Image: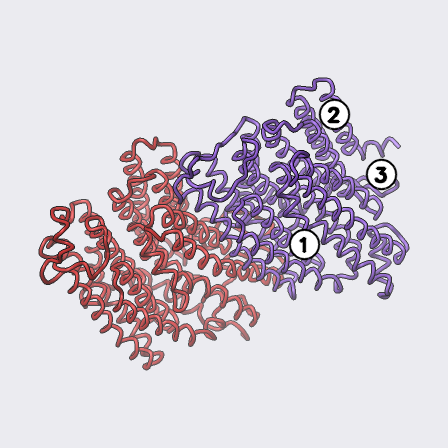
């Protein structure tokens, strides 16, 4: 059974099904979307369990001829790395759909259709092994996200969503040129189009030094915008602040990971020489992102914006780890991607829950929230400490491994980045203090009985994330062992190919 | 002689079809559907004949007309364009009391020109085909004869069009003189052995200028916005697609076949023209608030993308021509679709469409708005639509050609990002703004709906499963 195709296209089929449901019955639409996303989640768990039983680098491979004139195939496969990210995607998708039940009250049908198409796009990116197919899914992600921010977003949503699309598009279009150049160079060398777009056939064969440099630059730009790395991050705060809660969650939880995944799966294995050439620059930009994101987060007055900038800082660890090219660094980078997906998603969900009650995110207006809603405050505190990197919670392991890897590579870099773990504590705890402790602020008092504690549904959206944060915090080896093979292959493929 | 007639059958059918349309209108003067039905039947018969001829090549008229897969492709594309135009136009014209039969007949004559252009193997036939294709365009641009804007546009189109035809004709004559033959392939042979001389330089300059006028490349584009804005909307749709595709067939024949030995001379010129065309077209489209004018400028930008294919083909990549043909097919469906959408919004006489008129349309007419989104995404070049694959094909050819063509490829994709801004802005109005007051009227009859649907199916199918068209294109080029 083609389980990967099933996982990718089930949400799309679900979207088609939802399209035929009557708009007058929003709750039917909501539960249909939830059902589809839960089945997809269950399938992806089954796939994850099955990966180890399969031999070879990629499990459940599917390869069909699609555009034979150019050797473009429909090629899917999954390994430990993409498997973990697929499960993160399917998990966050149903959580987001559940979390949208209350907040989304207008154009319910269109919203869930967009969300399910978005899920198909994201899963396709993680499971494609053909560059052309990968690119198509990469762009498909863009359209529903554009609509989600633009239709259901905040006051400045149109500015934010167009900025998001244009930034991403500039990067990805140059990547398209690089993909075509790569394919053509393969055709010119081998004399046939067979495998010209196939990642596995191309890996390690691109020996043209110019293509190594330019190809890497184009891929890296696309992924750097997505991660986002400094100085391409400016779309992120706008998009996060304007997006509806579930949009922010998916943006932080999955879309940013597309960038990190792209580096590990495509940019570096295809262009290792280019990657080594640019590595010092990438490391420098990563360290700048780590420090700059944290510093800017300190002075933010909007809760969502603060977490958005903390994302810039945390994702800096991901790119730093990848470009150390050692096992600790890369292990840490992947852990950091997964953990950031769990923790920041939780924080955005919590900010959204608060916003539902106060219709405000201004930190200065808050204060003493814990007095009225102790459970909410406790949950917020839990995710916040995970984000700070408290040992025992999952945020710690990833950053620690990245720093270890960076230390092997360059102690100066590691030193500068370690300093930031203190800054993270500063901006998050300072925010927590202003929002949750002390006497109840007049603004919150004015809300009266509207300021309720979290509902059971909301706890249901947060509980799986919290549980995984604890489990992976205590035993990060569950994760690292699941993608050990992928990291090993990655490190092998990151060795220079020019001049061999 | 009999063989000649068989080879020319599609051309003859279409011309007789055009006459039959006029006769049917004389017989039943007040029934708009009769001429359309006759025209569609003629198109169907021509399509069948072309498909039948597509398998092998045959020549007629002493070798100056060669039927075969290339003509079949160009002809079928032209038939699709004319058929979609004929489906979307009648309701719009009827509401304004403009005749339908003349439109159908004029379009069929233009189609005959396009087929002749595709089949021409010498300079004279080529020029006759070109004129047969563009003169009906002048008539169509002035179709709304009581509207001063339409008349102004038509006069500009006619004057500049005749002017550029004259320039082109001068160039062709000089080229004939220098090469000593009118045959396209003969010219290529003659030029590859002889050294460059002053006459050749004059011919090249005149032909380049004349062709640039015909495809509306910057800075020879000034007639387009006026001609497009003044014409009735469905006719603008045709003008932005039909004559443009035909002009690119001319470019393929003149530059890629006849002037191939001089590629090193004309490639730099076309690189600059292409870069200027797409950049200026997109930048000006950004500033338009009238949707029709925006689409007019965006069609200039698409000319620039198509020119990338000519440059790649000039550098020796057959994929360049294949890319142009695929792009032309994709562009025909998506651009006509966008104009069909616009036509539906302008049911009432005198209606113009500003961006703000589209606000909230997604809520009131969701199906119509979703079709518009498909066309706009395709024009932007977002997968999995025809527009994406078309751009990819052209860019692939440019990357293969290397050198200046690669730089052009990068300029093209950056332009695609600029274009995304104004195409997506339409989607912003459709879905993200509150409805305008008073709301815009949507008029969709069964024919318009059929036209929209055909365009939409073409746009999606060419994106999801491009293989059949690629194979047709590749076959069209294999002689």
The colour of chain A is red
**Residue A130 appears at what percent x and percent y?**
49, 54
Assess whether mark 1 and mark 2 are in contact (beta carbons under 8 angstroms). no
Q: Residues within 10 Å of mark 1 (few under 14, many from 20)?
A: many
Residue B201 versus residue A390: which sits nearer the camera?
B201
Mark 2 vs 3, N-terminal side:
2
Between the C-alphas of marks 2 and 1, the distance is 35 Å
Image point (66%, 39%), residue name: B148
Above/below status of B435 relative to B254: above
On residue B217, the disc is 1
Q: Secondary structure at mark 1?
A: loop
Identify which residue is drawn at 58% across, 46% down.
B293
Residue in the foreground of this view, choosing between B183 and A374 = A374
Expressed as whole percent of the image width and height from the top left, the position of residue A145 reads 39, 50
Q: Is residue B215 above or below residue B311?
A: above
Instruction: Check chain identity for marks 2 and 1: say if they share one.
Output: yes
Q: Nearer the viewer, mark 1 or mark 3?
A: 1
Provide the chain ID for the residue under circle 3. B
Q: Could you tell me which secondary element the residue under label 2 belongs to? A: helix
When the figure is inspected, residue A143 is found, relative to residue B92, above or below; the finding is below
- The chain whose colour is purple is B
- SS for callout 3: strand
Q: Quadrant of the N terminus of chain A?
A: top left
Q: Name the residue tied to disc 3.
A: B60
Quadrant position of residue A79: bottom left
Q: How many angstroms separate mark 2 from mark 3 (CA)?
A: 28 Å
Q: Earlier in the sequence, mark 1 or mark 3?
A: 3
Describe residue B263's horizontal placement relative to residue B4 as left or right: left
| Residue to which mark 2 is pinned | B22
Tell me the crowding category of disc 2: few under 14, some 14 to 19, or many 20 or more residues within 10 angstroms, Cα based.
many
How packed mark 3 is, by other alpha carbons closer than 10 Å (few <14, some 14-19, many 20 or more), is some
């Amino acid at each position: 059974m083609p389980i990967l195709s099933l996982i990718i296209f089930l949400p799309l089929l679900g979207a088609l099904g939802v399209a035929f449901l009557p708009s007058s019955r929003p709750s039917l639409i909501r539960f249909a979307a939830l059902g589809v996303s839960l089945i997809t989640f269950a399938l992806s768990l089954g796939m994850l369990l099955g990966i180890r039983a399969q031999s070879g680098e990629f499990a459940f491979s599917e390869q069909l001829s699609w555009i034979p004139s150019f050797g473009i195939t429909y090629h899917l496969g999954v390994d430990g790395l993409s498997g973990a990210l697929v499960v993160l995607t399917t998990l966050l998708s149903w959580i987001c759909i559940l979390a949208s039940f209350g907040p989304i009250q207008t154009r319910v049908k269109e919203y869930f259709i967009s969300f399910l198409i978005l899920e198909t796009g994201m899963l396709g990116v993680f499971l494609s092994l053909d560059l052309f197919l990968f690119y198509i899914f990469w762009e498909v992600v863009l359209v529903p996200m554009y609509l989600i921010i633009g239709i259901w977003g905040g006051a400045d949503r149109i500015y934010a969503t167009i900025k998001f699309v244009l930034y991403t598009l500039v990067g990805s279009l140059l990547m398209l040129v690089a993909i075509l150049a790569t394919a053509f160079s393969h055709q010119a060398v081998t004399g046939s189009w067979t495998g010209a777009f196939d990642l596995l056939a191309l890996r390690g064969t691109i020996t043209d030094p110019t293509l190594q440099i330019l190809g890497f630059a184009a891929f890296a730009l696309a992924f750097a915008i997505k991660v986002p790395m400094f100085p391409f991050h400016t779309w992120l705060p706008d998009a996060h602040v304007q997006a509806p809660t579930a949009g922010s969650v998916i943006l932080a939880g999955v879309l940013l990971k597309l960038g990190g995944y792209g580096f590990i799966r495509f940019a570096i294995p295809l262009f290792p020489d280019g990657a080594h050439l640019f590595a010092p620059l990438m490391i420098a930009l990563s360290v700048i992102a780590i420090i700059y994101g944290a510093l800017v987060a300190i002075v933010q007055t909007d809760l969502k914006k603060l977490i958005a900038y903390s994302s810039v800082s945390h994702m800096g660890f991901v790119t730093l780890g990848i470009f150390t090219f050692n096992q600790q660094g890369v292990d840490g980078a992947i852990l950091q991607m997964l953990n950031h997906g769990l923790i920041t998603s939780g924080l955005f969900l919590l900010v959204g829950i608060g916003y539902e009650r106060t219709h405000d995110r201004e930190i200065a207006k808050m204060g003493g929230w814990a007095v009225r809603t102790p459970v909410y405050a406790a949950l917020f505190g839990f995710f916040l400490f995970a984000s700070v990197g408290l040992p025992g919670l999952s945020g710690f392991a990833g950053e620690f491994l990245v720093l270890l890897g960076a230390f092997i590579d360059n102690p100066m870099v590691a030193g500068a980045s370690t300093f930031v773990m203190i800054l993270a504590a500063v901006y998050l705890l300072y925010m927590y203090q202003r929002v949750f402790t002390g006497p109840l602020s007049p603004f919150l008092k004015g809300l009266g009985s509207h300021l309720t504690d979290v509902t059971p549904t909301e706890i249901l959206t947060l509980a799986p994330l919290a549980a995984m944060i604890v489990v992976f915090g205590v035993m990060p080896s569950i994760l690292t062992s699941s993608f050990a093979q992928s990291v090993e292959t990655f490190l092998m493929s990151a060795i220079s190919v020019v001049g061999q | 002689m009999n063989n000649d007639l068989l080879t020319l059958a599609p051309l003859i059918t279409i011309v007789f079809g055009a006459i039959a349309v006029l006769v049917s209108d004389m017989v039943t003067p007040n029934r708009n559907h009769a001429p359309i039905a006759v025209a569609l039947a003629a198109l169907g018969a021509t399509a069948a004949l072309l498909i039948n001829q597509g398998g092998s090549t045959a020549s007629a008229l002493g070798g100056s007309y060669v039927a075969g897969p290339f003509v079949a492709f160009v002809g079928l594309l032209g038939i699709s364009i004319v058929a979609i135009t004929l489906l979307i136009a009648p309701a719009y014209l009827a509401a304004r009391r403009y005749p339908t039969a003349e439109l159908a007949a004029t379009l069929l004559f233009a189609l005959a020109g396009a087929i002749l252009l595709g089949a021409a193997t010498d300079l004279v036939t080529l020029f006759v085909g070109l004129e047969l294709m563009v003169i009906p365009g002048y008539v169509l641009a002035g179709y709304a004869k009581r509207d001063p804007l339409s008349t102004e546009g038509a006069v500009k189109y006619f004057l500049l069009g005749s002017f550029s035809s004259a320039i082109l004709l001068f160039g062709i004559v000089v080229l004939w003189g220098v090469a000593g033959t009118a045959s396209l392939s003969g010219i290529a042979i003659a030029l590859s052995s002889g050294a460059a001389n002053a006459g050749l330089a004059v011919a090249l300059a005149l032909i380049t200028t004349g062709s640039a006028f015909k495809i509306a490349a910057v800075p020879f584009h000034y007639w387009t916005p006026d001609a497009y804005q003044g014409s009735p909307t469905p006719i603008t749709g045709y003008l932005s697609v039909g004559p443009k595709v035909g002009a690119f067939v001319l470019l393929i024949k003149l530059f890629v076949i006849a002037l191939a030995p001089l590629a090193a001379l004309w490639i730099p010129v076309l690189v600059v023209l292409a870069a200027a065309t797409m950049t200026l077209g997109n930048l000006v489209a950004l500033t338009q608030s009238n949707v029709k004018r925006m689409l007019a400028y965006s069609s200039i930008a698409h000319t620039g993308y198509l020119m990338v294919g000519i440059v790649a083909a000039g550098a020796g990549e057959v994929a360049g021509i294949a890319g142009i043909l695929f792009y032309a097919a994709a562009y025909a469906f998506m651009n006509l679709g966008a104009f069909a959408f616009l036509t539906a919004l302008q049911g009432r006489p005198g209606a113009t469409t500003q961006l703000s008129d589209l606000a909230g349309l997604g809520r009131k007419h969701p199906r119509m708005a979703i079709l518009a989104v498909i066309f706009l995404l395709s024009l932007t070049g977002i997968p999995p639509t025809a527009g994406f694959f078309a751009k990819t094909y052209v860019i692939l050819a440019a990357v293969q050609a290397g050198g200046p063509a690669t730089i052009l490829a990068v300029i093209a994709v950056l332009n695609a990002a600029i274009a995304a801004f104004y195409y997506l802005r339409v989607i912003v109005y459709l879905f993200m703004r509150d409805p305008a007051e008073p709301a815009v009227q949507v008029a969709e009859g069964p024919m318009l709906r059929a036209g929209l649907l055909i365009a939409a199916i073409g746009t999606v199918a060419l994106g999801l499963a491009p293989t059949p068209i690629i194979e047709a294109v590749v076959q069209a080029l294999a002689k």
